Image: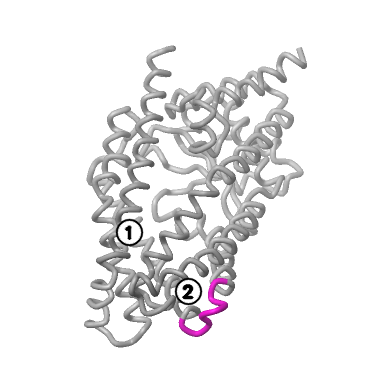
Amino acid sequence: MTDRQSSAKEYARQRRYLAIAMLIVGTVYLVMMILRGSAGLKNCATALADTRWIVVMLYVLGFVLLYEIVTLPLSYYGGFYIEYRYNLSSQSLRSWAWRELKRFLLSLVLLVPIVEVIYFFLARFPERWWLLASGVWILFTALLTRVAPVLILPLFYRQDPVKNESLEQLLQGLAAGTGLGIREVFRLNMSKETKKANAALAGLGRTRRVLLSDTLLDGFSDSEIGIVFAHELGHHVFHHITKAIVVSSVAALVGFALAHQVMLALVGPLGFEGVGDIAAFPLLCLVLSAFGLLILPIQNAYSRKLERDCDAYALKRTGQPQAFIAAMERLGSLNLADRNPSRFVEILFHDHPPIGKRIAMAEAMLKRDG
């Protein structure tokens, strides 16, 4: 094992420890709010306003702010310290803090209206709120997916057209017949924050686009970039974003239905006024979080399956298994990816196949085709 691979193992282990720590701290925060803090936070909100929607807004502001304060040390450790420790970050502390502030404000802008709608349904339709909330969540997810590339992503990263004639011709050739053109391919200035390389398919309808990080475009050969681009094309061709929305919609419906039953059973014993009591919001969060954790291995397995399909598509579309292997090797090294995690770790933490398995797929194709 090389020093780089050893560092990748250690880095992955640190990220897992951080994820577990965030889960524990978040759970403890919710439990403490349920048992002690939530009623006090509601009292503070009602002392400042007597209109229901304003009380809900003030409560959510306080709830999210307290959570951010509680988890700030872990956010700093995972978002700044670890990345610098492993020489993966190009951010200053000031830049990281500004990014975190924007993320916090954005979370409020998105969360407050959703909670307002949910608690409106809880107040008006206490028996059917979960069904209505599921519908709103599905619409919100679809809307957010559509507008994210043009309204949200620009708050954090600049997007520019790809300006490389030979590369443009390569990408245009790969995209031929898929419904995507070179005008839907953008360069993302991730290098201001990280040395890692990445790519993604984003958006719905007119906002659909492929995003390629500048670290990828500047550090990889054209054939390697073509492999990564073809993988993202696979997500487009196979309608993976739409499928992901459908899967998340089913999960939302089941999750809210479960939350309804649990809240009916527990709001009384825990001292809340009813399921529509904003003070019971941490209980709603706890149930949804527990459900999300329960189905996470299933979601990860489904995601890995989609990623394998896109790898196979990229190999078939390009016919270049050697370039695929080179791209995966470079991505794994640059991003400090654990090439061969244990099966247990893969099931719980990986939504992409490990680099080792992705390379093995290409090697099998290379061997089969001679």
Tell me: residue 322, above or below residue 51: above
Q: In which quadrant will I find the C terminus?
A: top right
Q: Is residue 306 left or right of residue 269?
A: right
User: Residue at left 54%, top 28%?
Assistant: 343
Magenta region, residue range = 123-130
Res 14 → quadrant: top left
Q: What whole-number distance in Å separates the C-alpha atoms at marks 2 and 1?
A: 21 Å
Q: Are marks 2 and 1 in contact (CB under 8 Å)?
A: no
Judging by the rendered image, the residue that carries numbered circle 1 is 31
Q: Residues within 10 Å of mark 1 (few under 14, many from 20)?
A: some
Residue type at mark 1: give it: Val
The secondary element bearing badge 1 is classed as helix
Residue type at mark 2: give it: Ile
Q: Which mark is residue 118?
A: 2
Q: Residues within 10 Å of mark 2 (few under 14, many from 20)?
A: some
Residue 315 point in image, percent of width and height: 69, 28
Magenta residue check for 177 = no
Instruction: Please tell me which residue lies in front, 356 or 169.
Output: 356
Tell me: residue 14, above or below residue 201: above
